[in-house]
Every structure is written in C-alpha cells, then in structure tokens.
Amino acid sequence: QVQLVESGGGLVQAGGSLRLSCAASGSIFSISVMGWYRQAPGKQRELVAQISSGGTTNYADSVKGRFTISRDKAQNTVYLQMNSLKPEDTAVYYCNLRDIRNYRYWGQGTQVTVSS
C-alpha cells in the first residue's frame, strides 16, 4: 500500500504564501505523475498542478504564475509553493500519485484558508 502524507496548510492573508509538502511511502511502484488537486466547499475536485517523472509540469490556468510545483524524486516528495494567494484559493488540497500502472493514490488532504 502507498501512503501520502501532506503538510503545510494553514490560514494566510490574501497576498501571502504557503508551501505544501507531500511525502509518499510504502510499496511505491514506479511513479508516473505526482500532483495537487483541491476541492472547495460545494465544488468539484480540480487539478491544481502536476509534475511528471520527466519533470514536465502542468498548471490550472487559475494558478499559473503564482504556484510552482517541484519534486524530490529521491525522497518521493512533491511540493507546491503558493504565492500571491487569493481568497478563491481556499480549499482542501489533496496530494495525488499515479504510477505507471495507472493506479492512483490520494492523501488525506490539508486545509488552505486565505482571508481577505
């Protein structure tokens, strides 16, 4: 089994920054993609950013230029640096891992709250 443990969420004022971390452990098969999703109350879960094993990144339009995803392959850890945060970024952020068999794993989620 694979475990994803997220950290770094919290409460921040608009314009501030937070850095999320997600560490993967357990019976990890070869990783294809790691990424972050978020879900705000009453809304569907959406992709925020993802990074492939080759380093290719993909961002939601709403966070481009403000968020940066990075990865430490040796530590099976992915980070999300979030700058210039807006109240609409408020959500539960979930770490996701997809391996080369296309199996998906999810973290427990970490709350990010941006006050105006």
Image (spheres, helix red, strand yellow):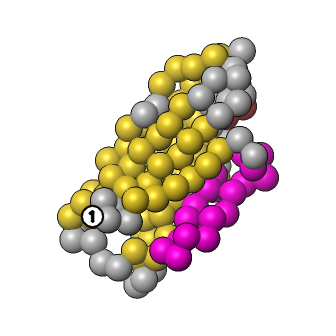
Does the magenta run of residues contain 63? yes
The residue lying at 37 percent from left, 56 percent from top is 77
Above or below, comparing residue 42 to residue 72 in the picture: above
Q: Give the magenta range.
A: 47-64
Q: The N terminus appears in which quarter of the rendering? A: bottom left
Nearer to the camera, 90 or 73: 73
SS label for mark 1: strand
Q: In which quarter of the image is residue 72?
A: bottom left
Where is residue 24, by image quadrant?
Answer: bottom left
Q: Given the current orientation, which residue lies at the most extreme bottom position?
A: 101
For image coordinates 65% across by 44% down, the residue present is 67
**Residue 105 appears anywhere in the view:** no
Can the viewer see residue 53?
Answer: yes
Left or right relative to 88: residue 99 = left
Q: Is residue 62 above or below residue 106?
A: above
x and y, in percent, of residue 23 in the image: 33, 52
Q: Does residue 23 appear to the left or right of 62 in the view shown?
A: left
Residue 45: horizontal and vertical position, in percent? 60, 50
- Above or below 111: residue 74: below
Residue at x 42%, y 44% (from the top left corner) = 21
The residue nearer to you, when weighing 66 against 35, is: 66
Question: Disc 1 designates what residue?
Answer: 2
Q: Residue at x 55, y 65 (%)?
A: 51
Quadrant holding the C terminus: top right
Q: Residue lying furthest right in this view?
A: 61
**Residue 56 on image: x %, y %:** 61, 71
Q: Looking at the image, how many numbered discs can be counted on the residues?
A: 1
Residue 59 is drawn in which quadrant? bottom right
Circle 1 residues within 10 Å: few <14, some 14–19, many ≥20? some
The amino acid pointed to by label 1 is Val
